Image (cartoon, rainbow, N blue to C red):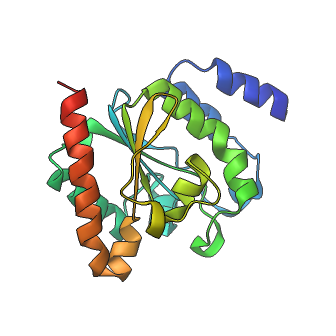
Amino acid sequence: MNDFELLAAIENCSDLEQLSLLARDCCRCGLRAGCRGVVFGKGNPDADLMFIGEGPGAEEDRQGLPFVGAAGQLLDKIILAGGWQLNEVYIANIVKCRPPGNRTPAPQEADACKPWLEKQIALIKPKIIVLLGSVAIQNIIDRGARITRDRGRWYEKNGIRIMPTFHPAALLRDPAKKRPVWEDIKKVRALYDSLIR
């Protein structure tokens, strides 16, 4: 399938399972050649709340699921502390394949992967998205965004309310960031409760 045909197939895709099957063979950037497989996403396909991180790490690449390593375990705790069940939310990443050595995805890699994420969002139709870290905010909101400056503020895009906060991996490196993340999650919970009644 050439790139034009692939993009048309993504556009015409009608469910997440079909989309994830299409994604398995994606080679739109060089990341696919250096990883075990595509790490598509996990969670409730009808979620009102979606979390978007950066990209898979070694453990995610091994298991084929996002956020299953140490940062993922912390994200699970954050979700539960916010009052949600894990099966209520959907979790994905900006890029679906592990960058070599867990480096930050290059802008062209993120751009190549963007049709997959945009279609995930279109199919899930979340009311709220939480962006985890600088790669997420720079690829969803603005390339010039800075997570330390812009976290904790509401954005809106295509009718979806968006809250950027620190990535769980940043909290593992710097526990002082836990308090601001908790403040952000409380804002998300309050809006969630007002929208989902």
* Residue 152 locus on image (x, y percent): 36, 57
Q: What residue is drawn where x is 27% and y is 46%?
A: 188
Q: What residue is drawn where x is 62% and y is 72%?
A: 103
Q: Is residue 101 visible?
A: yes
Q: Nearer the viewer, residue 5 or 153?
A: 153
* Quarter where residue 14 is shown: top right
Q: What residue is drawn where x is 52% and y is 60%?
A: 56
User: How many labels were placed on the picture?
Assistant: 0
* Residue 20 locus on image (x, y percent): 55, 35
Position of the C terminus by quadrant: top left
* Quarter where residue 178 is shown: bottom left
Q: Nearer the viewer, residue 164 or 80?
A: 164
Q: What residue is drawn where x is 76% and y is 46%?
A: 28
Position of the N terminus by quadrant: top right
Q: Is residue 17 visible?
A: no
Left or right of 185 in this view: 28: right
* Residue 96 locus on image (x, y percent): 58, 50
35 in relation to 48, above or below: below
* Residue 157 locus on image (x, y percent): 51, 35
Left or right of 95 in this view: 197: left
49 in relation to 106, above or below: above
Left or right of 14 in this view: 9: right
